[in-house]
Amino acid sequence: MEHSTSADDFIPAGLAAYGIEADEIELAVIQAAHQTFWPPILELLALDTSGIPAERAPDLSQAPPSR
Amino acid sequence: MSSALDLSLREQAAAIAAGEVDPGELLGAALERIAERNPALNAVVETFPERSREMLEAAPAGPLHGVPIVIKDEWPLPWRAQRFGAAEMLAPTAPGESGPYRALRDAGAVIVGVGNMHELGASSTGSISVYGPARNPWDPERCPGGSSSGPAAAVAARLTAGAVGADGIGSIRYPAAYCGLTGLKPTFGRSAMEGHHMAGVSTTIVSGPLCADAGDCRLLGSVLFGEELRRGEPQGLRIGVIGGDVSADVEPAVREACATAVEDLRRATGAEVREVELPELEAATLATVLIANSESLGGITPERLNDLDPELSPIGRGLLKYRVLLPAIATIKSQQVRTLARRTLAALFEKVDLLVCPTVPAVAPPLEAPIVELPSGTLTADEANVRGGALANLTGIPAISVPVGSSEGLPIALQLQAAWGRDELLLDVAEAIERANGRRWVDAVPPPARGAEALEA
């Protein structure tokens, strides 16, 4: 199945599901943001990260504990 | 005409301590200079002379006794709630004693004004603000950088010698780069953060100094850290130049200036230089944006989004609404990418002391059209800048932006990143770069600053 970066369905449906209204200019901004973010988001989702448990409450002031 | 305001931050502090400069006169001079230069720059959005004088009267004999400082519109003050550059914030705010305010007060500093910022901290350009954009002192038609636009423009124009910013995704380093300053993004959690509306929620934002040079950043940084950032002498450095788009897909003048700075540093310190790969960088950049955006969603409800202040920019309104549509799974994946990036960096910092790359890939773009032309094509400045700025915020490591050149009369900057807690090393190396190039770039001042010297490529 082909991925679509077109916002034709996703954006109106998503906003409607939350009951969020957007005027014409806001919709144009949202569509531009979607075109920028969605392709890399799909690439991110395709990453196999099953072997990488996220650090629990990572202490970002220090290096991660060695495994 | 020369003024004590044209002294460095540390020279101002030393001159006051020695009784050579009267701090009341210095405060008066800062307010006069703001009145004179700020209308063309819009760097400072509010002054409060009575409050400043009260601070001075109560100022203890600290390391910044009597020294005027600008603070970003991201930190509450006892007499003023932050506005975050926006007509409306989604988090509740109120006047109060933020961590940076307390640190400055306890060091004897005098807050002389509030610095402009990009609306909601949401861009590397500084092109949108409820106050109107701040302007770059090197060219008022150019972006000052964001989101700490006003603090950077204020210091570049020598309204004050130091300013406090905040950096959630590069927001100290981008304006430092565009305005020709030195800007330190501290290790996460090391600098004062109390009182920020995202404190305890954000895992990317830190406070930090914007100053002309590394010595001044060391002084103001020590105040914000609550501990002395001791000076060392970098020798035998192992420098890793980050490969890939972040170093290669940049304007030729940027690439050349950054390469020259690294070579100068190598010669001056006997450093060993090699290229290193960070294969996770692209995913890490997106992960930073997704995490930072999701952390700001706490105050959002659909009802709130349907009733946003009409004075909020259409871009700000649209982006707030788009954030709601970002899938939760992407944020979970982003946390895994964060883990991976932190592990990769921990291993890499066993082999190198520093990671370097251009802070931003192009000089400051026009305010009217914040886009940049790179070898790969035309990008928005935000898309291009985030490549270099995000990693430090995602992983918690410190980073610093150092001016190293110019093109078209606009500053160029190199970014240095080091392992967690090695903020002092970054300052040491920034000072080594200044010595290696004869302080050519940190001493250059833009046209609005009196006694301005031309910045020549």
Image (tube, grey):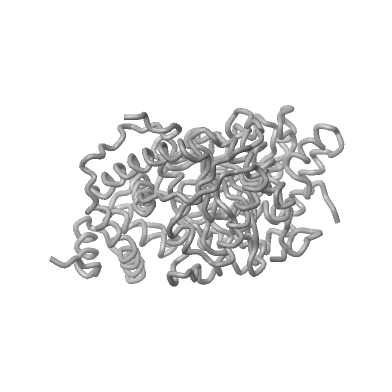
Q: In this view, does B441 lie to the left or right of B236?
A: right
Place of residue B355 in the rendered image (x, y in percent of width and height, measured from the top left) = 50, 46
Q: How many labels does the image show?
A: 0
Place of residue B1 in the rendered image (x, y in percent of width and height, measured from the top left) = 86, 56
Say which of B389 and A31 sits in front: B389
Q: Is residue B9 left or right of residue B123?
A: right
The residue under the point 65% across, 30% down is: B230
| Residue B121 visible in rendering | no
Say which of B233 and B50 sits in front: B233
B330, above or below B312, in the image: above
Quadrant for residue B178, please give it: bottom right
B444, above or below A61, in the image: below
| Residue B59 visible in rendering | yes
Please identify the residue farthest to the left as the structure is shown. Answer: A1
Quadrant for residue B406, please give it: bottom right
The residue under the point 21% across, 59% down is: A14
Place of residue A41 in the rendered image (x, y in percent of width and height, measured from the top left) = 28, 56
Place of residue B124 in the rendered image (x, y in percent of width and height, measured from the top left) = 49, 57
The residue under the point 50% across, 47% down is: B240
The C terminus of chain B is located in which quarter? bottom right
The residue under the point 30% across, 59% down is: A40
Q: Is residue B44 left or right of residue B339?
A: right
